[in-house]
Image (cartoon, helix red, strand yellow):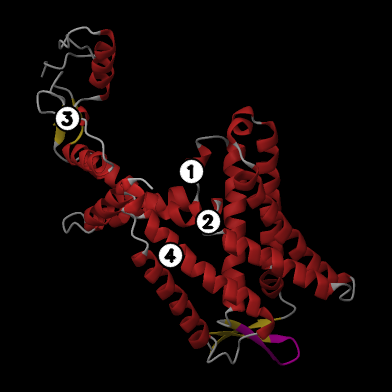
Amino acid sequence: MNERTSQINYVNPTLIGLAASILLTALVVIGSRNLEHFDSALFGYTVASVVAFGAIFFRYALWLQRPATRVYFRRGIQLFFQRRKFAANTVDSSKTLAKNLVGQRFIFKRGTMRWLMHFLIMWGCLSAAAVTFPLVFGWVHFNLEGEMGYRTYLFGFPLTVLNGRSVMAWIVFHALDFSALMVIAGCAIAIQRRLRDRGAIAVQQFLLDFVPHLLLIAISVSGLMLTASSLWFDGYMYSFIALSHQAVVIMTIFFLPFGKFFHIIQRPASVGVELYQSRSKEMEQAECPRCGTKFAAQMWVDDLKGVVRELGFDYTLEDGTTLQDYCPRCKRIMRGLAYSGLPNKAEPVFYGKRADEK
């Protein structure tokens, strides 16, 4: 075990994970009115969700222990709550959420089909989760009211009545079917890309890159089979399909904290990273001691020094500066000069205008 591994604190993440599981259990009990509206047939889903919820918080707490992640996370929060910039930061962060998380624009830059693939999978999964988990936990339930009316209850409080023959009711009751179709289409595009794209083929792994898509397809197909069985086949093999569906869902829920799906939990943190990058342009800029070019925020350079030092690397040079003090171009030149044994002389640099010109 190396020094860095021995410094990892597992106690706090474990306590955080346990607290998260206990909190979700309490919310299930309270939200279902002391389990009055809880369906015992969905007990397996609930147990898996409680365990996975704690595991997600455990993994996230471990992830935040990484030096670079911790710096980005803390700086993002620090910059967001700046008194003079709070309103502007709220607007900018909302735009980032809408652009990158809702609209998936960061994927669109890599290709239209990749964007469509990611958009369908993400919104198919999120919409399915938004419908499924409240029903499983007993937070939402329906009671028959009249001949074709369904009263909706949220945490035991009565809401609107849905007309069972209305278009809205049909959309609500078939929401999971629409989600399943979105996920199947997105996963089909993803698998096709991974079978044809040479760049993807060179680095992909079956467990990390194919199994998540296969699990999502299995959930979606078995869910559609449940609908077909109940609507068109008089419940033929419904129990077997339901048990198969439950098994695949539970496998996927357990896969969430430790597999590729975990990036769903990590991705919102990119809002803080983008805020850090945008606000750093307004701060004092670091000046390269070799060519005089201002190349990054001084805060960014100082944070990078701290992360490198915490990881156990020392890039201090003979003159007392560190390699992180230099601009990217001078780093490359200095490295080349060191390899060749030539003296390190600061030659004139042309960037469209000379560094010493004002």
Three-letter amino acid code at disc 2? Answer: Phe
Q: Nearer the viewer, mark 4 or mark 3?
A: 3
| Alpha carbon separation for disc pair 3 and 1 | 40 Å
Identify the magenta region: 141-149
Q: Nearer the viewer, mark 3 or mark 1?
A: 3
Q: Are marks 4 and 1 in contact (CB under 8 Å)?
A: no
Q: Which residue is mark 1?
A: 105
Asked if residue 145 is among those painted magenta in the image, a careful observer would answer yes
- Secondary structure at badge 3 equals loop
- The quadrant of the rendering that contains the C terminus is top left
Q: Which residue is mark 4?
A: 57
- Secondary structure at badge 2 equals loop
Three-letter amino acid code at disc 1? Answer: Arg
Q: Quadrant of residue 158?
A: bottom right
Three-letter amino acid code at disc 3? Answer: Thr
Q: Earlier in the sequence, mark 2 or mark 4?
A: 4
Q: Which residue is mark 3?
A: 316
Q: Which residue is mark 2?
A: 258
| Badge 2: residue crowd in 10 Å (few <14, some 14–19, many ≥20) | some
Three-letter amino acid code at disc 4? Answer: Phe
- Secondary structure at badge 4 equals helix
| Alpha carbon separation for disc pair 2 and 4 | 11 Å
| Alpha carbon separation for disc pair 2 and 1 | 26 Å
